Structure formats: structure tokens, C-alpha cells
């Protein structure tokens, strides 16, 4: 932490949380942004105020941002390229007689 | 809009690797988004930090002129609407601080820069809201100008900024409507109410046009920002769009922008307007607008008076953590 951080104190120490919101029952929680809070309880309260002012949610998750492990963009090709050539994993790859319906 | 100081020089940060630079530009040309962990030129990062933080500060400082009327709105309906709008602006500030943080600057640092007078916010918020009609004019003109600027920013090349702008634009659309509605109610009211509406338009018109920043001739960095797709339209293009959209709205409710040179150019379809007083613009940017000192004093006071809340929340969180640790150790 910088010298200035020490000087102006507390809020600098508040961790960042990622916010995930479930819009309606039956849907996934989706990432919608992040915020600073002193603890998870406060993060939930703030997430409600900041991200659900128009009824955008029925459930909120907050996760400390430093708990998220992300893939490295430099590894993108190594990780995802192999799937690109496997078009036979998609149903549209297969030729069927025209008379077959609903398969 | 909220970012008009952008046209100042941004440090170039020294030479960049030509190959990385070419790959970066190719990505932008393909309309792919740049994400926080991707390589980016230092000047791109610095330009965005400056622009996004300035935008965030504008949302926060922008709560002050409207907050001035929260307790005096003329009806419960208007009060509830204004409160919701001011709350939205606070939210916009937070989304934008979070977007800027992905570039490696902390929110605390950004707030320090604002409070120490080292960062700018939009000059428009240095004008006073002296009558109720000013609240109508702010929603209609200031939010209207903001939307004009923010819609293309939804396609900005920097992912976190673009996503914040999409959310903001969705929330923004009622801001302009409620302002225009308040203005039209006054314009169709008594003679005194209509005068009040016209007076507010007279005072807010030119500052609203200045929100788009210096003219293109005085914006040396426009070319680079356009190439990087941080900007999609020049200041003058956006200003013209705003005038074209707004003049008919004013006339529809019987009000007239305070510009004797305003005329419709049949050939191009554009509204031609008079010269902007750039001396006034530069004075306000330099800190000499009607409310610069008042706005900064209000922000500093709010920050100082909120200190105990931040300290108490931190102490509470620490206490809870140590209690949980003790309970776990006792098991
Ligand atoms: Fe806003
Ligand atoms: Fe707004």
C-alpha cells in the first residue's frame, strides 16, 4: 500500500467484490459488475442499491474479487482453439434425409 | 461530455513495441473489445483512466445541482422522480469508478485526485440551479447532451467502459424525459411559469453546447481517440446532432433557444447555430465558473463527514472477522 493509502485510511482497505445477479428464478446468476465494501454483508446491501434499482434481481451473490482465478488471455489459442475444428460436436454437422423431421 | 477535458495532451509514455501495437490496432479494427488483462499501449490506458474517471467524477458532482431541489420539488411525484434520478447518477459514478479500476488505478486514488483539485469533471455542473425550471432544463438538456455522447460510448473499444455505458444508457433515458416533461408543464402553465421555463433555457442552452468540449479544430487528440475507437464521433459532430434534436423539441413546447443566429439549413437539414463563447468555457474549466468552489467544497465536506462511517464499517468488519476466527479456533 502506498504512503497516501496509509494517510487517508480506511476505505482503501475495503476489498473489491464481484456481483452476480439472478434476474428471475430459473436463470443463472450473471456477473453484472463490482463494488467495494468492508465485508460481505455490506457488499450485499450495496449490490442491492447499486445494481437492482429497477427490479433487476431476485437473488444476489457477492464474491471477493481476489477469489477469482482467470485464464490468461495469452493462453487463449492453446485453451480454446482445439474446439474450433470439432464441428462434428454440433448437430448441424450431420446430413439427414429430407423426410426425417424433428430430430 | 462528461469528459470534455479529454482533449488535453496525454503523456505518450515512451515508445511501444511496434508488433504489439499493430496487433492491438488490428483487434480494434475488427471491432473486438480490449479487456483489462490484454496488452494495450500506455497512452490508451492513460487516456481511458483520464476519461472514465472524469466521467465518474461528473456523475458524482452532478448530483449536487439537482440535490439542491430535492427538498423543494413542487410535488411528491416530482420529488420521487428527482430522488430516483439523483440516485441513478450516484450509481453511474460507481459503475464508472469500477470500470476505471480495471485499468490499474484505485478508486481512492481517483477520489483523492478530485478532492485535491487534480482531476476534472464536466464544466456544466459549475452552473447554479436557481429555479425549479432549472431542474427541468438540466434533465432535458444536460442529460440529453450526455445521452448523445454516451450512446456511441456503448461501442467503445474498452470492454468494461462499454459495458458500463450500456447499463448507464438504459437508466439514462428517463432522465431526459422527466426533464422535458417538467419543462413542458411549465411552458404550458401561467405566463410567469412560461417565463421561468424560457429563462432556464436561456441560461442552460450555451453551457449545454459546451458540454461536447472544444471544437474539432482545437481537439488535437481526436484523431487518435477515433482510431482507437474510444471516440466514434468528433465533438462538433455530436454537438450538431444535439442541436438538431433539441431545437424542434424546444419549439414544440413554445420555447426558443437564445441564439439569434439559429436557422434551419434546408440543404443539409441541419440547424446552424452561432459561435460558442469559448472564453466562458475556458474560464469555467479553469475553476472560475459560478459554482466551482461551492461544488468542490461540498464534495470535500461530504467526504470528510463520511469518514466516521467508513471507519466504523471497517472496525465492524474487522471485529466480525476476529470473532469468527476465535470461534473457529475454539472448535
Ligand atoms: Fe448519469
Ligand atoms: Fe442522467
Image: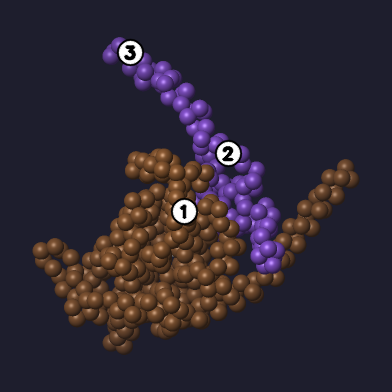
Chain colours: A purple, B brown
The x and y percentages for residue B36 are 51, 47
The answer as to whether the residues below labels 3 and 2 share one chain is: yes
Q: Quadrant of residue A47?
A: bottom right
- The kind of secondary structure element at disc 3 is loop
Question: Compared to B189, does A66 lie above or below?
Answer: above
The answer as to whether the residues below labels 2 and 1 share one chain is: no
Q: Badge 1 sits on which subunit?
A: B
CA distance separating discs 1 and 3: 60 Å
Screen quadrant of the C terminus of chain B: top right
CA distance separating discs 3 and 2: 41 Å
Disc 2: CA contacts within 10 A as few (<14), some (14-19) or many (>=20): few
The answer as to whether the residues below labels 1 and 3 share one chain is: no
| Residues tagged 2 and 1 counted as in contact (Cβ below 8 A) | no
Q: Quadrant of residue B286?
A: bottom left
Q: Badge 2 sits on which subunit?
A: A
Q: Badge 3 sits on which subunit?
A: A
| Residues tagged 1 and 3 counted as in contact (Cβ below 8 A) | no
In the image, B155: left or right of A15?
Answer: left
Residue at coordinates 64% horizontally, 74% vertically from top-left? B304
- The kind of secondary structure element at disc 1 is loop
User: From where the camera sits, is residue B184 visible?
Assistant: yes
Screen quadrant of the N terminus of chain B: bottom left
Please identify the residue farthest to the front as the structure is shown. Answer: B15
Residue at coordinates 41% horizontally, 78% vertically from top-left? B284
Q: Which residue is mark 1?
A: B14
Q: Which residue is mark 3?
A: A96
Residue A70 numbered mark, or none: 2
The x and y percentages for residue B63 are 49, 71
The x and y percentages for residue B291 are 46, 81
Please identify the residue farthest to the left as the structure is shown. Answer: B267
Residue at coordinates 41% horizontally, 17% vertically from top-left? A88
Residue nearer the viewer, B236 or B139: B236
Amino acid at each position: 500500500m502506498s504512503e497516501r493509502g496509509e494517510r487517508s485510511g480506511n476505505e482503501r482497505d475495503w476489498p473489491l467484490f464481484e456481483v452476480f445477479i439472478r434476474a428471475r428464478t430459473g436463470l443463472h446468476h450473471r456477473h453484472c459488475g463490482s463494488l467495494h465494501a468492508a465485508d460481505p454483508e455490506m457488499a450485499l446491501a450495496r449490490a442491492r442499491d447499486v445494481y437492482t434499482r429497477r427490479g433487476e434481481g431476485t437473488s444476489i451473490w457477492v464474491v471477493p474479487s481476489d477469489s477469482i482465478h482467470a485464464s490468461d488471455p495469452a493462453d487463449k489459442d492453446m485453451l480454446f482453439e482445439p474446439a474450433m475444428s470439432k464441428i462434428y460436436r454440433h448437430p448441424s454437422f450431420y446430413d439427414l434425409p429430407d423426410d426425417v423431421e424433428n430430430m | 461530455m462528461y469528459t470534455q477535458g479529454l482533449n488535453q495532451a496525454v503523456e505518450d509514455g515512451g515508445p511501444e513495441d511496434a508488433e504489439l501495437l499493430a496487433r492491438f490496432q488490428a483487434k480494434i479494427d475488427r471491432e473486438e473489445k480490449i479487456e483489462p488483462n490484454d496488452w494495450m499501449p500506455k497512452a490508451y490506458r492513460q487516456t481511458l483512466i483520464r476519461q472514465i474517471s472524469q466521467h465518474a467524477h461528473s456523475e458524482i458532482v452532478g448530483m449536487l445541482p439537482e440535490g439542491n431541489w430535492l427538498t423543494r420539488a413542487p410535488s411528491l411525484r416530482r420529488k420521487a422522480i428527482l430522488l430516483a434520478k439523483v440516485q441513478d447518477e450516484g450509481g453511474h459514478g460507481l459503475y464508472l469508478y469500477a470500470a476505471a479500476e480495471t485499468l490499474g488505478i484505485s478508486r481512492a486514488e481517483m477520489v483523492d485526485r478530485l478532492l485535491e483539485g487534480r482531476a476534472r469533471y464536466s464544466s456544466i455542473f459549475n452552473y447554479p440551479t436557481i429555479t425549479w425550471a432549472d431542474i427541468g432544463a438540466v434533465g432535458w438538456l444536460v442529460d440529453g447532451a450526455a445521452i448523445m455522447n454516451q450512446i456511441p460510448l456503448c461501442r467503445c473499444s474498452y470492454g468494461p467502459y462499454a459495458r458500463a455505458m450500456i447499463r448507464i444508457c438504459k437508466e439514462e433515458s428517463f432522465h431526459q424525459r422527466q426533464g422535458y416533461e417538467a419543462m413542458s408543464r411549465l411552458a404550458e402553465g401561467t405566463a410567469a411559469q412560461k417565463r421561468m421555463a424560457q429563462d432556464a433555457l436561456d441560461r442552460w442552452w450555451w453551457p449545454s453546447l459546451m458540454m461536447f468540449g472544444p471544437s474539432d479544430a482545437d481537439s488535437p487528440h481526436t484523431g487518435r481517440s477515433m482510431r482507437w475507437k474510444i471516440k466514434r464521433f468528433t465533438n462538433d459532430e455530436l454537438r450538431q446532432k444535439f442541436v438538431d434534436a433539441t431545437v424542434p423539441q424546444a419549439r414544440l413546447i413554445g420555447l426558443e433557444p437564445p441564439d439569434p443566429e439559429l436557422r434551419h439549413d434546408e440543404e443539409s437539414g441541419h440547424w446552424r447555430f452561432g459561435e460558442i463563447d469559448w472564453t466562458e468555457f475556458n474560464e469555467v474549466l479553469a475553476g472560475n465558473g459560478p459554482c466551482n468552489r461551492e461544488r468542490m467544497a461540498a464534495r470535500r465536506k461530504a467526504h470528510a463527514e463520511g469518514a466516521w462511517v467508513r471507519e466504523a464499517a471497517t472496525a465492524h468488519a474487522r471485529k466480525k472477522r476476529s470473532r469468527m476466527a476465535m470461534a473457529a479456533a475454539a472448535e
